Amino acid sequence: MDKTYTAIDLFCGAGGLTEGLRQAGFHVLAGNDFDEAAGRTFEATHREAKFLPGPVQDISAGALLKAAGLRKGELDCLVGGPPCQAFSVYNHQRGMHDERSQLFREYLRLVEGLNPRWVVMENVTGITSAGDGEAVQAILRGFKQLGYHVEHKVLRAEDYGVPQERRRVVFIGNREGIPIVWPEKTHGEGLKPFTTIRDAIGDLPALKNGEDKGIQPYACETAGEYQEMLRGGSNAVLNHSAPRLAPINIERMKHIPAGGSWRDVPYDLLPAGMKKARRCDHTKRYGRMTWDGLSCTVLTKCDLHWGAYIHPEQDRVITVREAARIQSFPDWFKFEGSRTEQYVQVGNAVPPLLGRRIGHCIQAAEEFVYATPIAAAE
């Protein structure tokens, strides 16, 4: 089955899922997001797609169809990840009362208006417990009412070559009765080794706290398949500057070995609020990465107060480019906006490598139905 798949990406952000689908051979025709900086990144990195700015509530199915040059029912796949803050475990007031938790209904509204053959939706695992699972049931119920059979599953990004502990709930479905195919693990026990921090960022230039050298050459030749894949012919490093941390944080980091955390910081140097913490609390806070391990989940702030974002050797937090490498973004992918906005774009994204696997699964499901070789699937 020789087919070019079309897609539209809602809540597209900088375009992590779009990039993954592009790598899988999809033609993403349009994207929407309310984040202006993310929109500039999306437009610059996916010139074949039309970006529609603004809140999804203001976007009509007709506008998306016009942008994509399609009629209702012709779109192959509608993808998107409604903002997840309402369901995140980091939000202690999370639940269905948060207005952001209702944005999946906007996705369903556009499914009805576009009538795509396939649907893909992703979110944080907290969605399964928020409101005692009410959100998941509402999503499945909504898809069923629109004529879609949808399944959901928790996928671990590290199982597919992403050097990061990242869990996401993914919903995949279609309106044609085609059985759902889920990506088989490629990394882990009995498979390829997990991609490590060294694999991800070991070739990037060293920086001091607060240092910004602009566009830089690589520190060394590629070492391994992952670096080779993400360089993709690039000859320079973009978005690689170190945030300036306060002197007290530099002093704290000097006491933290690879794999260590706030527990290694002398008591008198700890922030006041952490002096009362139990040793089992805040397990990742002020954490330093290890070269041979995985990263913790990349969030919208790679802040040492939030997790293990200290470089394995250098006394600084990881840069936007290092976070992007850990998310599996290619090096030519330039993030626009302020550095704070760039971190948000990277942390909110679906890792492109995971998006690529999802795209291949849709192709594989159709190829199986039409009894042709599954050449595109990995």
Image (spheres, rainbow, N blue to C red):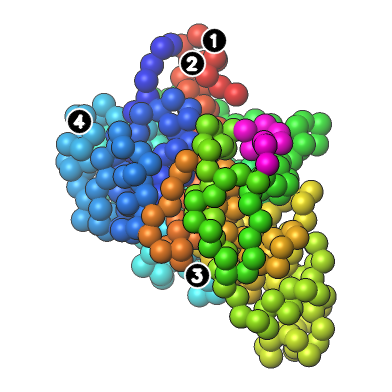
In space, the residues marked 4 and 1 are separated at their CA atoms by 30 Å
Residue at left offset 46%, top offset 63%:
339
User: Which residue is at a point 67% across and 78% down the rendered structure image?
Assistant: 249
The residue that mark 4 highlights is 69
Q: Is 240 part of what is drawn in magenta?
A: no
Q: Nearer the viewer, mark 1 or mark 3?
A: 1
The local secondary structure at tag 2 comes to helix
Disc 2: which residue:
367
Say what amino acid the circle numbered 2 marks: Glu
Task: Tell me whether circle 4 and circle 1 mark residues in contact (CB < 8 Å).
Answer: no
Determine the CA span between mark 3 and mark 4. Answer: 38 Å
- Residue in the image at 27% along x and 45% along y: 51
Q: CA distance from mark 2 to mark 3?
A: 40 Å
**Other residues around mark 4 within 10 Å, as few (<14) / some (14–19) / many (≥20):** few
Q: Amino acid at mark 3?
A: Arg
Say whether disc 1 or disc 3 marks the residue closer to the N-terminus: 3
Q: Which residues are magenta?
A: 220-228
> Which residue is tagged 1?
373
Q: Nearer the viewer, mark 3 or mark 4?
A: 4
- Which of labels 4 and 1 is toward the front? 4
Q: Tell me the element at label 3.
A: loop
- Residue type indicated by callout 1: Pro
Label 2 – label 4 distance at C-alpha: 25 Å
Q: Is residue 363 left or right of residue 115?
A: right
* Residues packed near mark 2 inside 10 Å, few (<14), some (14 to 19) or many (20 plus): some
- Within 10 Å of disc 3 (Cα), the crowding (few <14, some 14-19, many 20+) is many
User: Can residue 350 be seen at all in this image of the molecule?
Assistant: yes
